[in-house]
Amino acid sequence: MKNEIFEWLKSFAIAIIIVLVFNIFFATTVVYSTSMYPTLIEKDILLLKRTQEVKSGDIVSFKTDLMLSENDIQSLNPIQKLFASVNPSKNLIKRVIGLPGDSVDIVNGDVFINGEKLQEIYVSSNTNGDVHIDSIPNGKYFLMGDNRAVSLDSRDSQVGLIDGEKIIGRAIFRLYPLTRFGNM
């Protein structure tokens, strides 16, 4: 009987250690809007590699000062609702467009980084709004959604340039739905 209890405790301890190690290096997130369409769709579940080191073109999740709305909270599952009551701020998912030191210009729907026009095959709508940034400050990033018509991103003063410290991680894999399972 003692051996069986010891084996159960050992298995439980190993499981806890695996979960803790996983949470140190990885996270998951759910897509709640169409701002990254067609790359990501609502209810996609993504695996993130926890890192603040990102490159242009990466899809990242990051913390914001925006608050969850009542509609946002209603769309959450019971466990997420519990966490939302403790921390009601919104995490967003966007694509890295500009890195520290880059210049950004958006003119007539075209995006230029360091004077070169981006070829953005992933964009599903016109890029609205004109932007001019001489040089992105150290530690900041310019992020935009792929569905530019509806994306709340660095073009808007509510979001602005993103501090690298607020980046949770880089999306590396789609876990759900199973029909879209795999790399993005």
Image (cartoon, grey):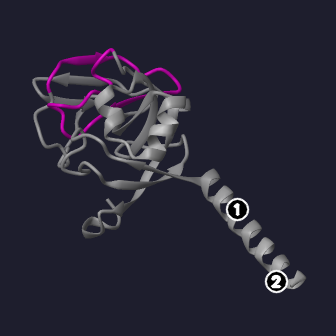
Residue 68 percent coordinates (x, y)? 38, 27
Q: Is residue 142 above or below residue 75?
A: above
> Closest to the observer: 167 or 77?
77
Residue 134 percent coordinates (x, y)? 35, 17
* Residue that lies at the very extreme toward the front in this rendered image: 1
Which quadrant of the figure contains the N terminus? bottom right
**Residue 69 image-quadrant placement:** top left
Residue at image coords 37%, 48%: 30
The local secondary structure at tag 2 comes to helix
- Taking 167 as reference, is 183 left or right? left
- Taking 27 as reference, is 175 left or right? left
Q: Which residue is mark 2?
A: 4
Q: Which residues are magenta?
A: 128-157
The mark nearer the N terminus, 2 or 1, is 2
**Residue 103 image-quadrant placement:** top left
Is 142 covered by the magenta stretch? yes
Give the amino acid type for the residue marked by disc 2 in the picture.
Glu
Q: Which residue is mark 1?
A: 16
Which quadrant of the figure contains the C terminus? bottom left
As measured in the structure, the alpha-carbon distance from the residue carrying label 2 to the one carrying label 1 is 18 Å
